[in-house]
Image (cartoon, grey):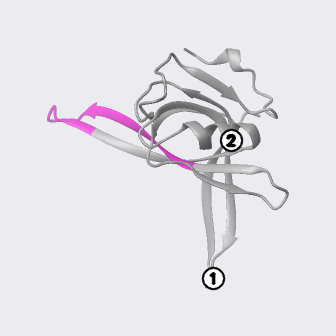
Amino acid sequence: MVNKAMLIGRLGKDPEVRYTPDGTMVTNFNLATDEQWKDKNGEKVQKTEWHRIVTFGKLAEICGNYLVKGKLIFVEGRIQTRSWEDKDGVKRFTTEIIASNMQMLDSKGQNRTEESSDAHSISSNNANTPTDDVPF
């Protein structure tokens, strides 16, 4: 069985940083991916899909320190759906990508003091996925 997600998109806002009770750093951020096509009238149509991304540990630290709204990144991970009950007792669900690898693809959104550079790749220490199989 395979559970693997690979996305290229832009951050909708700066990552949110928090810590688990045992002190592990966690970042959450939303990533926008776009799809474009022409409709039956030849008009260009664009659809944006939003993905919730979660990172842990060293990868979370890198994401929290270097990612900002508008940054173009590649994320690789697994899809996870979890559920909980809200304050009114209604069962809620969310689907997220638990990232094991992240690669910064451009310098958009970087602070001016940071140097622009080619892509940087960061992998989670506990990832079982090799980073050399990225398709580009």
Vertical order, 87 against 127 (above or below): below
Q: Horizontal and vertical percent for residue 77? A: 67, 36
Number of marks in picture: 2
Q: Which residue is mark 2?
A: 61
Q: Horizontal and vertical percent for residue 41? A: 14, 35
Tell me which segment is drawn in magenta.
Answer: 29-45
Within 10 Å of the Cα at label 2, are there few (<14), some (14-19), or many (20+) other Cα atoms? some
Q: Secondary structure at mark 2?
A: helix
Vertical order, 53 against 100 (above or below): below
- Amino acid type, mark 2: Glu
Based on the displayed image, in which of its 4 quarters is residue 38 positioned? top left
Identity of the residue drawn at 65% across and 36% down = 62
- Amino acid type, mark 1: Lys
Within 10 Å of the Cα at label 1, are there few (<14), some (14-19), or many (20+) other Cα atoms? few
Based on the displayed image, in which of its 4 quarters is residue 5 positioned? top right
Which marked residue is nearer to the observer: mark 1 or mark 2?
Answer: 2
- Residue 68 versus residue 90: which sits nearer the camera? 68
**Mark 1 vs 2, N-terminal side:** 2
Q: Horizontal and vertical percent for residue 130? A: 75, 21
Magenta stretch prevailing secondary structure: strand
Q: Residue furthest left?
A: 41
Which quadrant does the N terminus fall into? top right
Q: Residue furthest front?
A: 113
Which quadrant does the C terminus fall into? top right
> Is residue 42 shown left or right of residue 68?
left
Identity of the residue drawn at 60% across and 51% down = 28
Q: CA distance from mark 1 to mark 2?
A: 31 Å
- Residue 108 versus residue 125: which sits nearer the camera? 108
- Residue 35 versus residue 10: which sits nearer the camera? 10
Identity of the residue drawn at 62% across and 79% down = 90
Identity of the residue drawn at 80% across and 29% down = 128
Q: Which residue is mark 1?
A: 87
